[in-house]
Amino acid sequence: MEIKGTAVIAIRDFVRYTYPEQFKAWVDSLNPEAKAIYSGMIDSSKWYSLEEGGIEATRKLGEMFFEGDYKKGAWESGRFSAEKALNGIYKIFVKASSPGYIIQRASRVFATYYQPCQMKILERTDKHVVLQISNMTKSDIVIEHRIAGWIEKALHISGASDVKLEFPKSIAKGDAVTTLSINWN
């Protein structure tokens, strides 16, 4: 399973901009393979190992900056990534779009960040959607929470409030697919 360089850069930038004094210590704490990725030039168009480029780096930021709460660290990293990705002209577009439309677009773009995998909409109403993530050969709770944090922030940018996300099924917990149930006002 692989993660796109743009997502790896977002993880790096989350730590670099949020915890600048601890950035070097975070990089130094990574296993040798992940440290090699985060110490060098990250190519936004290249694919990296999900284990080192995503899971290891996100677990370490949860350990170092969120008192071991990997889920919270992943969630906040995902929110940061959405804020970074949806800025400038994209932010205007997102604010002008409905939350449901943003989710529909996100489900199409998802495979450009993680491969091989697929995201599709199972249910959709004005204030509710159920997404299904499949074809992930490897998953981890931190990746699922990073995705959920990204979606939550994108919905907030589009004007949604009181966003609630739940995982009825999780590949990371042994299910065949991950489902994400999302409600908002």
Image: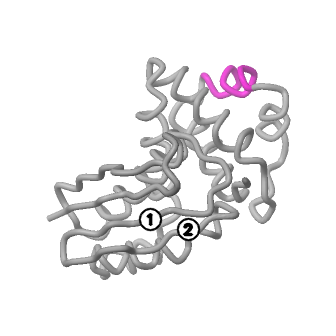
Position of 93 with respect to 47 (left or right) is: left
Residue 179, above or below 140:
below
Residue occupying image coordinates x 54% and y 21%: 63
Which circle marks residue 132 in the picture? 1
Q: Looking at numbered disc 2 in the image, what kind of residue is underneath it?
A: Phe
Is 23 covered by the magenta stretch? yes
Q: Which of marks 2 and 1 is nearer the N terminus?
A: 2
Residue that mark 2 sits on: 110
Q: Find numbered disc 2 in the image and state the secondary structure of the residue it sits on.
A: helix
Residue occupying image coordinates x 65% and y 28%: 23
State the extent of the magenta-drawn residues as a range. Answer: 22-30
Tell me the crowding category of disc 1: few under 14, some 14 to 19, or many 20 or more residues within 10 angstroms, Cα based: many
Q: How many numbered badges does the structure rendering display?
A: 2
Give percent across and percent down for residue 108.
Answer: 52, 77
Q: Residue furthest left?
A: 185
Q: Looking at numbered disc 1 in the image, what kind of residue is underneath it?
A: Gln
Give percent across and percent down for residue 27.
Answer: 72, 28
Give percent across and percent down for residue 69.
Answer: 44, 25
Residue occupying image coordinates x 46% and y 55%: 178
